[in-house]
Image (cartoon, helix red, strand yellow):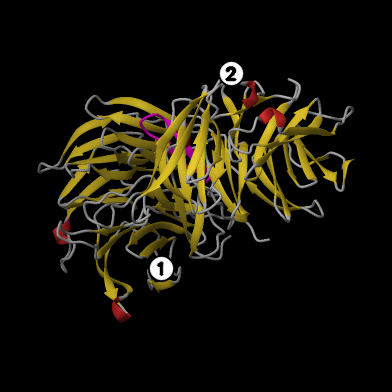
């Protein structure tokens, strides 16, 4: 048994969160510090729902809080000012109620407070009566449900009220007329209790213990589509094109409701999430940007998960976790989410969403510039993104074809290749304030075959899918002085990277052996065919499996294979190698070396750090899906970016 009361619901007003508990009333917390500011006394009831109420259109910030309890009573609370204008606590103004079951849900429009009860009823109360010192009388009763009413949501214009209940029915009430009337009923909308309901601009969405989100056209009463999950969906909220649901297993899911595409799955908790709701923006008539969100969560195990860019990054804790989750809401004024737990705790998470990963496709190329902490990212969809200091600066749909390679050039330029036979050069152009940037196409080069690797060393060098190494910018494509392929057709080029301003390394695999090439490109007039050197460094005829990744730093070479094995050269002898040892449980896709660390990425979804001297593992990060590539920041060698198959980017750093 937990020694603390269960936290059941939360409501946010500005910089403060009010949490309702099982059997012990209400507590008020500061979101900035996580400290408890105030707690109710002698309130030995369970608070099942909370709502900050705005009494009029001219009011900029709500002053009244309404709570619904297991004792069938509603309580109205007013803010108390503390020292230096800070919120000092809450003062109860009154208590009333006429429903015969626990109060399960609250909602408001500009005229009414709606309360839903386990006695199958909904009551409308005039907001203007909430401040009366005398007893408050109900304005209207809404009766048609045949089970407890579990959720309420007013339409955006406030004229309709949507309700769902334990009778599996959705109902729409016209509250623009007096008395309010039932205008639409959708019986048997789900196979189990309805747990949540929300409005979008085009439809309404309901969640249920049957594991489904259903999208409804209220005019026709038809279900437009459904999203199905393997366990019950106990809460739902909607922001723009995204619908967010909490499930019984403690995960938060984000879908695009118009297409049923799942954007991300956040394993936030180990136990049930009971409720989620969205609050309006703090600034009137200003909508929250759905592309940038923050998520507050609570868990029974005290664990924290970090996700970038569709990530969950923990930045505030009210108490440690030891109980199941009961509520998730968004912090008012900023795109954030809160959730509370049975252990009396509240946590705050940030989710920064770029364009949906499933639309971008997998990450296919990443490249750091040599300065200014700039990163260019390419996707299967042909989308280019420019990042600086781990923040998205600009994006461009460069092509309808998959981006295959990116390399940094001089003068803020980047070369980009695709699955089609051309290479573009893009230039980064900043505004005068250096606050906004655009990617402008400088030129396009036509090549014989699609290019899979690029490097720049006074000339732009490409490797074609055929294995041909060539000067991308050469005007005479038939002149063999600008092409070279001294290796056999069996050599697979795995990586090409700059050594200095006039030379680059080329790393490949030939029948189980590591092949290293060194190429000079001293301007366009130097034929490549005369400047490339190569050598075969290692073969393992008996135990060799396909080499899938290789990297080097001077005489130190690291290899990885399709089975997840990793092995190393043993300088100063090029012919001396360590034995292959398991490093990952699946194919190694990328390897990098810094002065002190070896970094490996794999299809097993992990990025691992290894001490360069001892070869012992010193760190690990788990991504959302198979990791396809990674790059180390040349300006900050203890920072890297990696991309996975779901189109997610992860910005990671560590202490040397």
Can residue 208 be seen from the camera position used here? no
The correct choice, above or below, for 123 with respect to 199 in the image is below
Segment colored magenta: 247-266
Q: Label 1: state its secondary structure.
A: strand
Q: Is residue 183 left or right of residue 384?
A: left
How would you classify the magenta stretch by its main secondary structure? Answer: strand
Q: Nearer the viewer, mark 2 or mark 1?
A: 2
What label does residue 29 carry, if any? 1
Which percent across, then down, holds residue 452?
A: 60, 28
The stretch drawn in magenta includes residue 68: no
Residue occupying image coordinates x 19% and y 46%: 141
Q: Is residue 485 left or right of residue 43?
A: right
Q: Is residue 118 left or right of residue 589?
A: left
The correct choice, above or below, for 577 with respect to 136 in the image is above
Which quarter of the image is occupied by the C terminus? bottom right
Which quarter of the image is occupied by the N terminus? bottom right
The residue indicated by pointer 2 is 478
């Amino acid at each position: 048994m937990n020694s603390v009361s269960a936290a059941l619901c939360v409501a946010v007003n500005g910089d403060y969160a009010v949490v309702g508990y099982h059997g012990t009333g209400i507590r008020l917390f500061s979101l900035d510090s996580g400290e408890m500011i105030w707690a109710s006394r002698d309130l030995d009831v369970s608070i099942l729902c909370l709502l900050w109420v705005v009494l009029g259109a001219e009011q900029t910030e709500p002053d009244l809080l309404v709570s619904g309890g297991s004792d069938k009573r509603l309580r109205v609370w007013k803010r108390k000012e503390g020292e230096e204008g800070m919120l000092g606590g809450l003062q109860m103004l009154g208590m009333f109620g006429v429903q015969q079951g626990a109060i399960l849900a609250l909602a408001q429009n500009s005229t009414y407070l709606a309360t839903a009860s386990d006695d199958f009823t909904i009551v409308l109360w005039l907001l203007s009566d909430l401040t009366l010192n005398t007893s408050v009388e109900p304005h209207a009763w809404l009766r048609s449900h045949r089970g407890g009413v579990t959720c309420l949501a007013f339409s955006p214009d406030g004229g309709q009220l949507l309700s769902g209940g334990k009778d599996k029915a959705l109902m729409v009430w016209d509250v623009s007329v007096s008395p309010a009337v039932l205008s639409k009923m959708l019986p048997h909308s789900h196979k189990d209790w309805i747990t949540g309901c929300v409005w979008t601009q085009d439809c309404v969405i309901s969640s249920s213990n049957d594991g489904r989100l259903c999208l409804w056209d209220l005019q026709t009463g038809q279900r437009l589509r459904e999203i199905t999950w393997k366990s019950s969906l106990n809460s739902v909220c909607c922001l723009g094109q995204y619908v967010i649901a909490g499930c019984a297993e403690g995960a938060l899911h984000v879908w695009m409701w118009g297409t049923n595409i799942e954007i991300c799955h956040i394993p936030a908790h180990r136990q049930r999430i009971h409720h989620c709701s969205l609050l309006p923006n703090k600034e009137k008539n200003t909508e929250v940007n759905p592309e940038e969100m923050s998520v507050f969560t609570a868990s029974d195990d005290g664990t924290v998960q970090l996700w970038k860019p569709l990530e969950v990054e923990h930045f505030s804790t009210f108490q440690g976790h030891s109980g199941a989750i009961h509520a998730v809401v968004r912090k008012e004024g900023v795109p954030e989410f809160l959730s509370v737990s049975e252990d009396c705790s509240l946590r705050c998470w940030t989710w920064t969403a770029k364009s949906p990963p499933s639309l971008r496709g997998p990450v296919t190329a990443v490249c750091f510039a040599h300065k200014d902490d700039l990163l260019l990212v390419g996707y299967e969809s042909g989308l280019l993104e420019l990042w600086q200091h781990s923040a998205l600066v600009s994006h461009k749909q460069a092509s309808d074809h998959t981006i295959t390679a990116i390399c940094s050039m001089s003068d803020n330029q980047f070369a980009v290749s695709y699955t089609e036979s051309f290479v573009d050069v893009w230039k980064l152009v900043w505004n005068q304030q250096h606050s906004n940037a655009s990617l402008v196409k400088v030129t396009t080069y036509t090549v014989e075959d699609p290019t899979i690797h690029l490097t720049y060393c006074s000339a732009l060098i490409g490797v074609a899918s055929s294995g041909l190494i060539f000067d991308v910018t050469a005007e005479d494509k038939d002149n063999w002085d600008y092409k070279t392929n001294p290796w056999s057709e069996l050599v697979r080029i795995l990586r090409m990277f700059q050594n200095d301003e006039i030379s680059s390394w080329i790393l490949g695999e030939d029948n189980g052996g590591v092949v290293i090439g060194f190429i000079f490109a001293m301007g366009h007039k130097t034929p490549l065919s005369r400047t490339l050197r190569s050598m075969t460094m290692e073969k393992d005829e008996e135990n060799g499996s396909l080499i899938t990744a290789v990297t080097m730093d001077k005489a130190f070479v690291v290899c990885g294979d399709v089975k997840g094995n990793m092995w190393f050269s043993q300088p100063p002898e090029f012919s001396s190698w360590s034995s292959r040892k398991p490093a990952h449980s699946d194919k190694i896709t990328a390897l990098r070396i810094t002065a002190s660390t070896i970094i490996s990425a794999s299809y097993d979804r992990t990025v691992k750090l290894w001490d360069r001297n001892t070869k012992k593992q010193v760190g690990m990060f788990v991504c959302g899906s198979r990791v396809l590539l990674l790059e180390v920041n040349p300006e900050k060698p203890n920072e890297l970016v990696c991309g996975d198959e779901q189109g997610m980017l992860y910005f990671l750093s560590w202490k040397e």
